[in-house]
Amino acid sequence: MDPPIQIVIFGASGDLAQRKLLPALARLAADGRAKRGFSAIGASRRRMDDAAYRRQLAEGFPDELRTAFESLAPHLFYQATDVSDPESLAALSERLDSLPGGRDTGRLFYLALKPQLFGIATRQLARAGLLAMREGESVAWRRVVIEKPFGHDLTSAVALNEELHDVLREDQLYRIDHYLGKETVQNLLGFRFHNATFEPLWNRHHVELVQITVAEEIGVEAGRGAYYDGSGALRDVLQNHMLQILALVAMEPPVSLAPEAIRSQKVELLRGLRGPEPGEARASCVRARYGPGTIEGKPVAGYRDEQGVAPDSQTETYLAVRAEIDDWRWSGVPFLLRHGKRLPRRFTEVQVQFRVPPLQLFNRPEGMSESELRRALRDGSLCQIRPNVLTLALQPREAIRLSFGVKQPGSTMRMAPAALEFDYREHFGSAPPDAYERLLLDSMLGDQTLFLRADEIEASWRYADRVRAAWQGPDASPLLEYPAGSWGPEEADALFHGCEGGWSRG
């Protein structure tokens, strides 16, 4: 049998490692999904021994994972390490050689570090001889996982990719976006390409518009004010999470489920995403920040009053964009993307709104003649009901809902709304696994399907930079303000044209 894998988590004392990565490893250790087995080393600059590290983690583990932690603890170690210090990395190398499998096993290096350290860490790991491997190696491989953000614009993303490629091949790099580890996000592929009911309709001939919403109740979390103020909603959510969802919703069918087949189709889709042209900013983009307001009956501060945020900040906490894709399938179909903090509800969903039939036969206004009806429908003063909307709810509830019209009982031909609904938890009897469990397991197995390729990162930044440039143009609307606890600025409603409808409220 292949020797157990060695996993090194740099930044082991940080929030990501203790809140997400180690609990995910504990669940993998407890249920045996990592069949090859693994040893995990926490690495950070703080000095402590293995026993102290295990005690520290045990104290912070949630009660429901106590048993799982007991499965992980015998395979959990600690090594004080500074990624910029060659002597420190030499000591780490010796420690890894002493663990089961030694140098003849696979090694996964997870950089749960500040983005500024990605290049330094990989360069130093390479100099220490920790990343060298033969191409195509299936047992004693070397892989590196990095977390977003992957740069802060296209220029920095290209520079980071070049820096990483100086010491790593693309097949060794696992750029992680935890949204892609969510079961319901992955189901976008299965739902689209397994069900013949929907795939023939998934195009500009039948779909009127698509809207994607990532709504959050929270504001700037404690300790993240300074980071968020240098990032904002565009960089923090739209450039990565939302464009990843968009790519899965709109991409062409892959020829297989092989990682490169799927990732190549996502890249092609993102390359076709058209950013705002000069002069279009006011008509296609809205940005805002939350002011003081009320959440669940309690007053909350405005964004500029949050800890770590500059008093004169011009950072957006809300954005709404009307985007289009220049390709054969979607040309002319608007994709409405919206994300905001301090909204009334937390939810992430995709709504696919289908076109109405060519003739309105039902629910006609009483007393209106045929000619008046045609004229009202043509000039937009009367809108047909959009009966067919497919809603893919991704969080916090994982569900699929299809709305349609049915005839009301009685002597008149009046249609009423109805729906078919599927709920993940009700159907399968349990909640989907945590995203990091899936992504950590895939990185151990060498499956890059749910990880981002260099050209994919650059394509998404290219679009995000166009949006940001439009905001800075002479025709751009000012940064608006909306009360915390509201659905955002009213100006975002104008991104829907004519009879297209309005934003979902979950």
Image (cartoon, grey):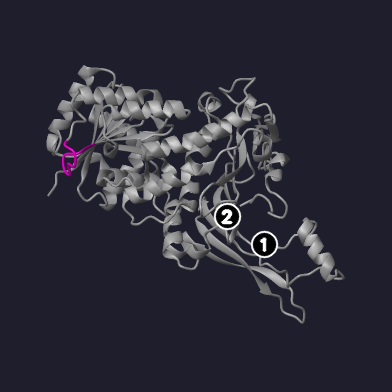
| For residue 343, side relative to residue 265 (left or right) | right
Residue closer to the observer: 28 or 242:
242
Q: Mark 2 or mark 1: name the one nearer the start of the chain.
A: 2
Q: Position of residue 159 (x, y in %)?
A: 39, 25
Callout 1 secondary element? loop
Q: Is residue 110 magenta?
A: no
Contact flag, marks 2 and 1 (Cβ < 8 Å): no
The residue positioned 62% from the left and 30% from the top of the image is 471
Residue closer to the observer: 193 or 269:
269
* The quarter of the displayed image where residue 19 is located: top left
Q: Is residue 270 above or below residue 386?
A: above
Q: Where does the magenta region start and end?
A: 134-142
Report the residue that reaches farthest toward the front. Answer: 328
Give the residue at mark 1.
Answer: 386
Q: Position of residue 128 (x, y in %)?
A: 19, 23
Q: Is residue 139 magenta?
A: yes
From where the camera sits, is residue 429 visible? no
Which is the main secondary structure of the residues drawn in magenta?
Answer: loop
* The quarter of the displayed image where residue 216 is located: top right
Mark carried by residue 351: 2
Q: Is residue 96 above or below residue 365?
A: above
- Which amino acid type is shown beneath numbered disc 2? Gln
Label 2 – label 1 distance at C-alpha: 12 Å
Residue closer to the observer: 83 or 464:
464
Q: Residues within 10 Å of mark 2 (few under 14, many from 20)?
A: many
Q: Position of residue 469 (x, y in %)?
A: 58, 29
Q: Residues within 10 Å of mark 1 (few under 14, many from 20)?
A: some
